[in-house]
Amino acid sequence: MGIINFLLLRSPSVATTPSLLTPLSTDRVSETVGVFVPLRNEAENVKDLISTLSEQVGDFHFYLLDDNSEDHTFDLLNQYTAGNSQFTVIKGAPLAQGWIGKTWALQQLFTQSKEEFLVSVDADVRLTPDAIGRSIATLKSTSLDFISPYPRQIALTLSERMIQPLLQWSWLSTVNLRIAERTSRPSMAIANGQFFLVRRRALEKIGGYSAVKNAVIDDVFLARELIRQGFHGSVINGASIAECRMYTSWNSIKSGYGKSLNRAFGGSLGATMVIIFLFLSSIAPFLLSLTGNFYGWLGYVLIVFSRMISAFKVQGKIVDSFFHPISATLLIYLIIHSFRVRSSVTWKGRTV
């Protein structure tokens, strides 16, 4: 499967459509693009975020919502966007009952906007100047309803390097992406909320973000709901146009995955099956190889090869592929940890 996806994984189109590169007239609503950025306690990211958005080539409008931050996020947003009519800064309403922070922020951004193409970007994502234009061009040329250009995951510390590459490897090695983007099966949905594009009519059909209002893994659940309602889309390779450093330490990795992995596999049974799969495919072959077993060596070589082609495709560190058994072991630990702390997880000052 990894080889098939390596050959067929879509990359962003070249944005040659004039309407993406020149100002739009007010009567061409079908060509307008709104960009959503929810922010909570993101003071350290505001300056670089505004810079990366300001450099985008195209007539886009940026909606920035401060989700009741406890730092200076709101003041910095106003400071760095002052005098720029492309930006609308919004002070978010208090968290509504039954919602989680990010989906509530996205719903408010959705109701504030009117554009036909909607793009959501996390505050820690950095884009090339043509990133949004090329992504919109891809959405249009493929006639899909949503796409998720998967950013290059920046991993600097050892713990990041052991865990973060598994994000892309997991779907590159297990799901036929060309089938997934046209499927009617929600279980094949793949998405990354760091960078997500959707047609407004599709999002309106499912009731906006209310369909996933309490979903911690809001990106995948949103994609599932869109597919369930008859819309189509999937991930594309966004490594050449976007990058993101999700976590900066082992503690932040534990916190981040602690809030989500217990909900990623459909419950404890699904998580158990994933743990068994990881052990049999990624750890057992290596242990057998240490005894000189030929099939153990073969299994280890094949799993490392799958990691290598994934790393090459998404601009990761190929050398880290050889440590895949360690990565799998750490992921198993994080899955178990997530279930252990699921009733007491907090994120950005809120209980999840």
Image (spheres, grey):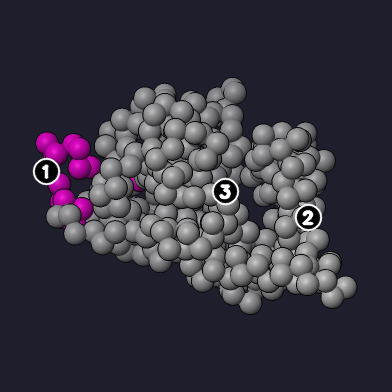
Who's the residue at 73% across and 54% down the image? 278
Q: Which mark is residue 41?
A: 3
Who's the residue at 84% across and 67% down the image? 288
- Give whichever of 238, 298 is nearer the camera: 298
In which image quadrant can residue 15 be found?
Answer: bottom left
Quarter of the picture holding the N terminus: bottom right
State the image coordinates of residue 229 (x, y, percent, origin top left).
42, 26
- Residue type at mark 2 is Phe
Query: Any magenta on residue 29?
Result: yes
Categorize mark 2 by other alpha carbons within 10 Å: few (<14), some (14-19), many (20+).
some
In which image quadrant can residue 29 be found?
Answer: top left
Distance from Cα at disc 1 to Cα at disc 2: 57 Å
Which residue does the numbered mark 2 point to in the structure image? 279
The kind of secondary structure element at disc 3 is: loop
Who's the residue at 59% across and 44% down the image? 70
* CB atoms of marks 2 and 3 within 8 Å: no
Horizontal side, residue 199 vs residue 208: left or right? left
- Give whichever of 321, 4 is nearer the camera: 4
Who's the residue at 72% across and 46% down the image? 274
Question: Is residue 210 in view?
Answer: yes
Q: Which mark is residue 25?
A: 1
Quarter of the picture holding the C terminus: top right
Seen in the picture, residue 34 relative to 238 is either above or below; the reply is above
Q: Which of the two discs, 1 and 2, labels the residue nearer the N terminus?
A: 1
Distance from Cα at disc 2 to Cα at disc 3: 38 Å
Horizontal side, residue 97 vs residue 224: left or right? right
Range of residues picked out in magenta: 19-35
In which image quadrant can residue 79 be found?
Answer: bottom left
Q: Which of the two discs, 1 and 3, labels the residue nearer the N terminus?
A: 1
* CB atoms of marks 1 and 3 within 8 Å: no
The kind of secondary structure element at disc 1 is: loop
